[in-house]
């Protein structure tokens, strides 16, 4: 046999130039792929340490990692730092212990390293910086805000109150992509800043986003006409949106999304009326006071023996208290004065084939369906005929701008659907082929293969049931044929002796028959093994497995 070097030389000389180039390229590609896979396997898993960092914080953290010799990666234009997963939490705690990342905002920690002998001006300046930093951190915790900066102007105190100027503040917000702040959120930020600075009014806080748009509005006095008008308009908008969403959700559940358009317009009554009502009940009168005056007078004339004359008067005054009820009724502004609902309902479409071409036919809603939908809308918005409410439901055809897509047969599938179907069929066939190879493997096949029918009769012949012979020492009862052969009137001892002799003879006869049967079975087994060795080996494996 030639050496391996000579064999390789002969093999190389027998190859053509193209085969040699392909062989060298394949070897280089395999070696390169192996080296690349080995480097990937040995490379540590990198996890995100911090993300969304400022340039100053990222530079400080990278400097700390270089000092400790920890490998790192930068991503997202330097705003994300990755470190090995094995040291992720240790590095994060170490960096946090040094106050990083600070997001380039200084808070109350500025007073942790205050120098001795600091002037009053520097103390005030540091306090303002700390207050601005803490407010910026608090505002940055809002869900819509990515970062924030706060500037506060606190004027110096003057001797006269008339010359004292009020503090002002400005907030610059960097909102997250695709997020926005509502008016209530902006007012909340204004009140947050105003509540943190003594003497600062919410109207003196200006809020601007990263694009320079003014988010805050000039605050109006609570009792001014402009303030009331703005509040009333916003309340009416909220009521319209609530009722519109309520009806739209019902129709979308019944007709499907995109088959109904609803608009609700409400007219709210902002008139504040206070009524006073006073009722008297004459049936429930009570005597409050009573006064009685009696007067009497007489004039005497005794001439002629006549009796003296006289006069008498009585006056009675009774004052009654009548029960009364006083009611003061105040109508709360904002009640719905009138309601108008407009709803457009789309019909259904059906594809019909005409002259070999598919055509989409519009089918309008029936009057019964429109009446049911109208009743549903009335119940959803709280329709009241006494308020002169109006509900208009119209069935029109929607212009979706989509081309009609006729139904396709099974053989008219799109290319991507054919690819998906072929992939599924290929996966099923591959699974069946793999299962077939597994079942036919030498390790699995002997355990699941069925024993041939011709082997079944041989199994009971290999292990027949052997008769259980009685013992000669004691027998509970004698067989019938033995009793018939014994003479009558024989003594008991002689009878027992004869019985034992007969049983010993039967036992010896059975033993000889058993030995003969065993020898016969041995010969059959040997013959079966010689004639069918594979089946015999399979049978032995089956018996051992059981």
Image (tube, grey):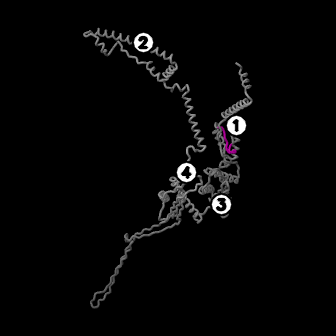
Numbered disc in front, either 2 or 3: 2
Q: Which of marks 4 and 2 is in front?
A: 4
- In the image, which residues are magenta? 75-84
Secondary structure, magenta segment, majority class: strand
Quickly name the residue at label 1.
Answer: 69
Pick whichever of labels 3 and 1 is earlier in the sequence.
Answer: 1
Q: Residue furthest bottom?
A: 304
How far from the left and from the top, in percent, is residue 248? Answer: 53, 56
Q: Judge by depth and name the residue closer to the eye, 445 or 501.
A: 445
Residue at (50% x, 53% y) in the render = 254
Q: Which of marks 2 and 3 is nearer the N terminus?
A: 3
Crowding at dot 1, Cα within 10 Å, few <14 / some 14-19 / many 20+, comes out as few
When the figure is inspected, residue 486 is found, relative to residue 156, above or below; the finding is: above
Q: Alpha carbon of mark 3 to alpha carbon of mark 1: how far?
A: 53 Å
Closer to the chain start, of discs 4 and 3, is 3
Which of the two discs, 4 and 1, labels the residue nearer the N terminus?
A: 1
Mark linked to residue 197: none
Image coordinates of residue 185 in percent, x first then y, are 60, 55
Report, in whole angstroms, how far the alpha carbon at label 4 lies from the one at label 2.
Answer: 90 Å
Q: What element carries label 2?
A: helix
The disc at residue 516 is 2
Work out how far the residue at label 2 is from the one at label 3, CA to CA, in angstroms.
Answer: 127 Å
Residue carrying label 4: 353
Q: Is mark 3 on a helix, strand or loop?
A: loop
């Amino acid at each position: 046999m030639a050496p391996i070097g000579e064999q390789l030389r002969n093999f190389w000389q027998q190859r053509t130039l193209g085969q040699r180039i392909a062989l060298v390229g394949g070897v280089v590609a395999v070696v390169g792929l192996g080296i690349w896979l080995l480097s990937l396997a040995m490379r540590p898993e990198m996890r995100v340490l911090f993300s969304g960092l400022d340039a100053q914080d990222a530079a400080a953290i990278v400097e700390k990692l270089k000092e400790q010799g920890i490998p790192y990666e930068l991503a997202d234009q330097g705003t994300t730092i990755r470190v090995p997963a094995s040291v992720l939490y240790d590095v994060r705690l170490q960096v946090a212990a040094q106050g990083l990342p600070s997001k380039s905002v200084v808070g109350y920690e500025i007073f942790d390293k205050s120098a001795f002998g600091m002037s009053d001006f520097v103390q005030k300046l540091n306090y303002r910086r700390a207050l601005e930093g803490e407010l910026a951190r608090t505002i940055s915790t809002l869900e819509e805000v990515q970062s924030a900066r706060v500037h506060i102007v606190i004027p110096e105190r003057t001797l006269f109150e008339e010359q004292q100027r009020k503090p002002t503040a400005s907030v610059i917000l960097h909102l997250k992509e695709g997020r926005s702040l509502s008016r209530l959120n902006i007012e909340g930020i204004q009140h947050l800043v105003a509540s943190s600075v003594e003497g600062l009014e919410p109207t003196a806080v200006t809020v601007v986003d990263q694009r320079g748009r003014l988010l805050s509005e000039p605050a109006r006095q609570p009792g001014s006409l402009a303030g009331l008008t703005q509040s009333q308009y916003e309340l009416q908008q909220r009521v319209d949106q609530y009722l519109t969403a309520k009806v739209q959700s019902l129709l979308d559940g019944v007709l499907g999304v995109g088959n109904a358009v609803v608009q609700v317009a409400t007219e709210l009554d902002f008139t504040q009326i206070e009524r006073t009502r006073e009722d008297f009940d004459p049936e429930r009168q009570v005597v409050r006071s009573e006064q009685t005056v009696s007067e009497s007078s007489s004039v005497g004339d005794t001439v002629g023996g006549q009796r003296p004359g006289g006069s008498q008067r009585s006056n009675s005054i009774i004052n009654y208290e009548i029960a009364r009820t006083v009611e003061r009724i105040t109508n709360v502004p904002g009640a719905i004065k009138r309601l108008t609902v407009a709803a457009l309902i789309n019909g259904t479409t059906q594809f019909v084939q005409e002259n070999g071409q598919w055509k989409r036919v519009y089918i309008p809603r029936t009057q019964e369906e429109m009446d049911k939908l109208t009743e549903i809308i009335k119940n959803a918005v709280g329709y009241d005929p006494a308020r002169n409410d109006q509900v208009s439901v119209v069935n029109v055809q929607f212009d979706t701008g989509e081309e009609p897509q006729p139904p396709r047969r099974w053989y008219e599938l799109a290319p991507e659907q054919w690819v998906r179907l072929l992939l599924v069929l290929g996966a099923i066939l591959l699974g069946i082929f793999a299962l077939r190879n597994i079942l036919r493997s030498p390790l699995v096949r002997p355990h699941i293969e069925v024993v041939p029918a011709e082997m079944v009769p041989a199994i009971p012949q290999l292990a027949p049931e052997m008769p259980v012979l009685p013992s000669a020492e004691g027998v509970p009862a004698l067989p019938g044929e033995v009793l018939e052969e014994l003479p009558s009137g024989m003594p008991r001892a002689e009878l027992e002796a004869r019985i034992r002799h007969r049983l010993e003879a039967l036992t010896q006869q059975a033993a000889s028959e058993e030995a003969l049967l065993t020898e016969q079975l041995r010969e059959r087994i040997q013959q079966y093994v010689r004639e069918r060795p594979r089946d015999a080996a399979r049978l032995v494996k089956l018996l051992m497995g059981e």
